[in-house]
Amino acid sequence: MVLEFRDEGIFCPAGGFHIDPWRPVDRALVTHGHADHAYPGHRRYLTSAAAAPVMRHRLGDITIETMEFGETRDINGVTVSFHPAGHVPGSAQVRVEHKGEVWVASGDYKTTPDGLSETFAPVRCHAFITECTFGLPVFDWKPEAVLAAEINAWWQANAAEGRVSAIGAYSLGKAQRLLTMVDSGLGPILTHAAVENTNDVLRGQGLTLPETVRVTPETDPKMHPGALLIAPPSALDGRWARRFGPMSSAFASGWMALRGVRRRRATERGFVVSDHADWKGLNAAIAETGATRIFATHGYTATFRQWLESQGYDAQIVQTEFGDELVDDEDAA
Amino acid sequence: MKRFATLFTALDQTTKTTVKTAALTAYFEDAPDRDKLWTIALLSGRRPKRTVNASRLSEWAAELAGLPMWLFKASYDVVGDLAETIHLVLPDPAQTADRSLSDWIDMIRGLSAEEEPARKAAILQAWDQLAGTERFVFNKLITGGFRVGVSQKLMTRALSRATDIEEAELAHRLMGDWAPGTTTFAGLITAPDPEAALSRPYPFCLAYGVEGDPSDLGPPEDWLAEWKWDGIRGQLILRGGQHFLWSRGEELMTDRFPEFARARDFLPDGTVLDGEVLVWDAEAQRPRNFNALQARIGRKTVPKKLLAEAPVILRAYDLLEEDGEDLRALPFADRRARLEKMLDGIAPQAPVALSPVVDFADWSDLAPIRADARAAAAEGLMLKRAASPYHVGRKKGDWWKWKLDPLSIDAVMIYAQAGHGRRANLYTDFTFAVWKGNELVPFTKAYSGLTDAEFNKITYWVRRNTLERFGPVRRVPPEHVFEIGFEGIQKSTRHKSGVALRFPRMLRWRPDKPVQEANTHDDLLAMLDQYG
Ligand SMILES: [Zn+2]
Ligand SMILES: [Zn+2]
């Protein structure tokens, strides 16, 4: 096996390194900065160049080396490279080749372009470790433009009625994705500090985001009528949000496709915006790898494996500690 | 259908009653009469009958979506709703259609007369013509599961605003066994037919649970106390030489409980009583427990044997109509006095008896009486303000229920299963066990009572501590203790533990409690002895 599944994470015995391990190891290749993939405490980190700034921002003083997408490196006779996963800016799939056998660990991925993350690039391989957060045929994402129109219409209607529009979104990825979707001509965009800190990091590495106003204790909501507010979901539920007066709240997540989950959030609106591949995306991505062995992790693994087997793949389930996607927010950790 | 789908979306995506009322009022102001009538019907639970069975629908949807049946079922398991699952897996429609809500409902109702191939063709065509929420709503209608978070009260308020008819009057007109197929909007709402009023029940007055201490309610002399029975709330109507028995859910139960035909022999015409239907133990002069009633509830027609074994009576506690006169505006104490007079000396073989008041001078007298409710075969007390009218629906302030605390036991969680629908992505359905020596014996399942935050936390733990999987069920290590509350306990041969609980739910997660200190099987059996 080029890659093995161990208690501490995915391990490459020949190369002596781990991929997204959840316990401290010597050398960790990390796909992206979400907390369920980028754990603290490893001795050395290796990431895509575009993922590194956020990783430093979140994990502090770590020893980190980077590689450009597509660049290869030899680690103890094993060739490794990073390839865009389209999940969040900088997110990577990890390609690992040993003695001609190629494995790819997908991390989290999304196959449709969003104008922000580097577009997902399929990588040919023999074995593919795939997430399947939304691995059921009920998940079928609408085109980006349709979603953007829904969000903008909602914002516009609220602004006309003198209400703030508040969207709960995870601070890395979802928040910036929303920023690129909305029509910034509709009004001012206010951001929670957690979101704005990540914005700063991403702007610092050259990403273009619309103008935003960081909410501080001094911010006077009255100065920003008809604003759009982007904040982590937890902040919208709490005291922090009260100063904005009457507002319409929304939540952006792939889970919003399910009416039941949408109703549980008790927000006014649920926008089906996900950083993960939908059913068609997962199937297309797997087919494009040309892999015959598939390892499913992160989601509806049992069902997804059975489906892959019925499609002629040699499919297995692997237990990882990725993805608290089952726990409410798409990237809760 | 567009207008109705828009209304549905507006109602479904907000929790604010003001927004809901406004959306409904606007709809009632400009929708065509037939659509309004059907909307009232749907929102008051009068759904069209299911004309196509669920497994056919599933098969057709799976076929159209190109999915194997097992995968469709696995998806349904997660979504928790057939109409929604079908809606989500179907390909986008290729055609359009502009038909009204009542038009589509006529089409659905017409399907019952069709052969299966024609039904299938009609359904597939509809799926290919309806987009977005319209298709979801259509599926809800064909699966007979249409439901939206609007109370009858809220709907009545909106209708009242749109028609300028008083709310209480509308609430009354909407009661009873009218059907949208046999009446019109005018016949029901604007110019009601007096003939239809014969069987029509009054809207039930409903109580809230006591919060805090009942002494906060004010001087005890302003209040009357009664036992709160554990039966079926019922309204018995004697009018025009006929009798009707209605449940609180506005279900006509007359045929289910033939005992009440004899009420006409003992009570005058023009009488409406509110009370509790109970299985009566004539020898012990007390109601039997709810399990006995359960046997009757399930039967549409009652075999003689069961009728003899589990006879029911109505224990009446309110008089709503006397000599055909509506008494609801009178103070409760007056209605009660009239009721007592009417039932005074009624023959013991009559299917109606007076539900007694419970005397008390001071609030402090009442707590020990309530604590003894189980001995009186009651589940607590009702407190009613002597001066209060008989309200329409639930209104805070005049009627309170003061129930006994549930029975409870500390149990260990041993299996977890993901929830459906609202909680599709959380582990919420747990199996609980108690100790029998060193063994854990499962005895109940429970899926409610915790906050979403707690379910989140447990889900996180379950995902990391799964020992074994059996389909959707995961076996987990016995590490967490929960306090399980329930309303009753009975013997069961179907369960390994030998008991079955009524309304089990989680009262509390007890992370403070070591697993070894959970209750034992002997504790359960002792409860069965005492309360079974
Ligand atoms: Zn992620
Ligand atoms: Zn993840």
Image (cartoon, coloured by chain):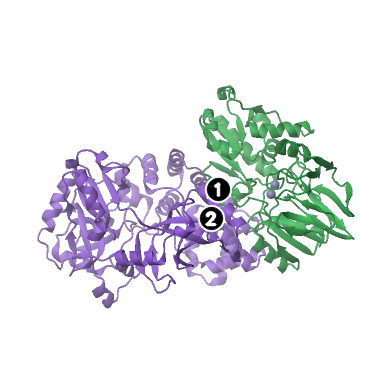
Chain colours: A green, B purple
Q: Quadrant of the N terminus of chain A?
A: bottom right
Q: Nearer the viewer, residue B5 or B277?
A: B277
Give the structural element (helix, strand or loop) at label 1.
helix
Any mark on residue B421, and which?
Answer: 2
User: Residue A195 placed where, x, y %?
Assistant: 66, 34
Q: Nearer the viewer, residue B184 or B270?
A: B270
Marks 2 and 1: in contact by CB < 8 Å? no
Q: Is residue B98 visible?
A: no
Q: Quadrant of residue A33?
A: top right
Amino acid type at mark 1: Arg
User: Residue A186 placed where, x, y %?
Assistant: 64, 30
Any mark on residue B521, and which?
Answer: none
Rendered residue at 77%/51% (across/down): A19
Residue topped by disc 1: A262
User: Residue B481 placed where, x, y %?
Assistant: 47, 56
Q: Quadrant of residue B444?
A: bottom left
Amino acid type at mark 2: Gly
